[in-house]
Image (cartoon, rainbow, N blue to C red):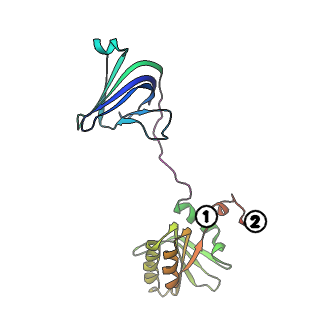
Amino acid sequence: MRLVIARCSVDYAGRLSAHLPLAQRLLMVKGDGSLLVHSDGGSYKPLNWMSPPCTLETTLPDEAQAANGVVEVWKVTHKKTADQLIVSIHEVLHDSSHELGIDPGLQKDGVEAHLQKLLAEQIELLGDGHRLVRREYMTAIGPVDILATDASGGSVAVELKRRGDIDGVEQLTRYLELMNRDPLLAPVSGVFAAQEIKPQARTLAEDRGIRCVVLDYDAMRGLDDSDSRLF
């Protein structure tokens, strides 16, 4: 990635036209060829940009541009649309390049897989006497997140969501209908567990005899002691 801080003006020419008057800005040239123009504000959104596939050509200014103080011109052309982003640079204050390598991508905290692992380790959150049978119990229509047994030895199918909605209840209902046909498992009760359960989903679950459990993710990770709270 190349980072250039410069006094510049910017013009976009193509299906739309836009102009940024002379000011100090950050020019970000990424490894995929894209160019983004940032100001010191506006959060993550650039003032203007050109997305790949595109090419960057650096040229010297013509006489008229040079007379106006331009020392370098960047022309970024989109390969498919021929749109152009033209950056007229008057002064370069900083120019550096950095090799960032391959990015592993965003790893979301609290995803369902982590909730599943934590609940499997703390299966007693479903109630005293519950025991884990296995995670990802496979059925003919897909895996149930957790299969457990309750205090009486009855089978319990658990569907986990970060935010529980009606679709999650419907999914668990299909699993229960199938699993209750298996004489080795039946009768199978259902637990719909999530960090947050929408009222409509709770109503539907309870109408179908499915128990709802709200999970405190921070407490499960040991980051928050819910028993010591005042509120």
Cα distance between the residues tagged 2 and 1 = 25 Å
* Amino acid on which the number 2 mark rests in the picture: Leu
In this view of the protein, which residue sits in the foreground, 221 or 155? 221
* Amino acid on which the number 1 mark rests in the picture: Leu
Report the residue at 27% width, 38% height from top. Answer: 16
Q: What residue range appears in magenta?
A: 95-110
Q: Is residue 108 magenta?
A: yes
Badge 1 marks a residue whose secondary structure is helix
Percent position of residue 1, x then y: 44, 31
Percent position of residue 111, x then y: 53, 59
Percent position of residue 123, x then y: 63, 72
Report the residue at 65% width, 83% height from top. Answer: 151
User: Would you place residue 134 above or below residue 156 in this image?
Assistant: above
In this view of the protein, which residue sits in the foreground, 163 or 67? 67
In this view of the protein, which residue sits in the foreground, 166 or 187? 166
Total marks placed: 2
Left or right relative to 123: residue 146: left
Report the residue at 39% width, 74% height from top. Answer: 141
Q: Is residue 231 magenta?
A: no
Q: Which residue is mark 2?
A: 230
Report the residue at 75% width, 65% height from top. Answer: 230
User: Would you place residue 65 above or below residue 224 in this image?
Assistant: above
State which tag comes first along the sequence, 2 or 1.
1
Q: Which residue is mark 1?
A: 118
Q: Which mark is residue 42?
A: none
Is residue 61 visible to us here? no
Q: Residues within 10 Å of mark 2 (few under 14, many from 20)?
A: few
